[in-house]
């Protein structure tokens, strides 16, 4: 599908579903950026299923799963994570990368 959309010189990437890099941006100061692992350390009681903590917004587990499911349901070949080192270690329960596992299979069962 990617080749179909972009193989003919088309430069509009609006059809591509992806989730943002694994970091948070300040809502009042967009230039204030922290890696997800930093946010997790700074806010030990953060709810990783939500998309915000303190003044920062990020893609939490529910949003990551939804975006992966949306890509699967629309027939895209996959999603991309820009920088895995911004996440927690893969073995940690709250790591965002864990949201990728099984999300495509879940897409077949859930409505978006």
Image (cartoon, rainbow, N blue to C red):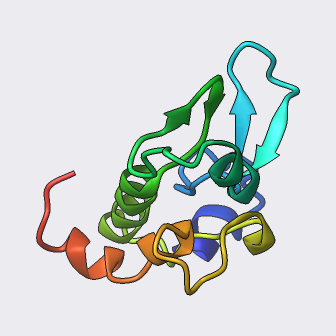
- Residue at the image position 38 percent from the left and 62 percent from the top: 65
- Judge left or right: residue 107 versus residue 26: left
**Furthest-right residue in this view:** 31
Residue 87's place in the image compared with 22, above or below, is below
Q: Nearer the viewer, residue 49 or 106?
A: 49
Give the percent coordinates (x, y) of residue 28.
73, 13
Q: Nearer the viewer, residue 8 or 82?
A: 82
Q: Quadrant of residue 103?
A: bottom left
- Residue at the image position 48 percent from the left and 39 percent from the top: 51
**Furthest-top residue in this view:** 28
- Residue at the image position 33 percent from the left and 77 percent from the top: 104
Q: Nearer the viewer, residue 80 or 2?
A: 80
Give the percent coordinates (x, y) of residue 55.
65, 23
- Residue at the image position 59 percent from the left and 72 percent from the top: 2
Give the percent coordinates (x, y) of residue 69.
34, 65
Q: Nearer the viewer, residue 55 or 111?
A: 55
Q: How many marks?
A: 0
- Judge left or right: residue 43 versus residue 8: left
Give the percent coordinates (x, y) of residue 31.
88, 26
**Furthest-front residue in this view:** 44
Q: Quadrant of residue 26?
A: top right
């Amino acid at each position: 599908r990617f080749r179909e959309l972009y193989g003919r010189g088309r430069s509009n990437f609006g059809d591509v579903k992806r989730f943002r890099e694994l970091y948070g941006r300040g809502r009042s100061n967009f230039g204030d950026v922290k890696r997800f692992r930093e946010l997790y350390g700074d806010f030990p009681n953060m709810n990783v299923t939500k998309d915000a903590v303190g003044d920062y917004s990020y893609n939490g587990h529910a949003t990551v799963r939804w975006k992966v499911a949306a890509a699967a349901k629309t027939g895209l070949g996959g999603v991309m994570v820009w920088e895995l080192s911004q996440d927690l270690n893969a073995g940690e329960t709250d790591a965002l990368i864990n949201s990728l596992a099984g999300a495509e299979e879940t897409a077949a069962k859930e409505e978006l």
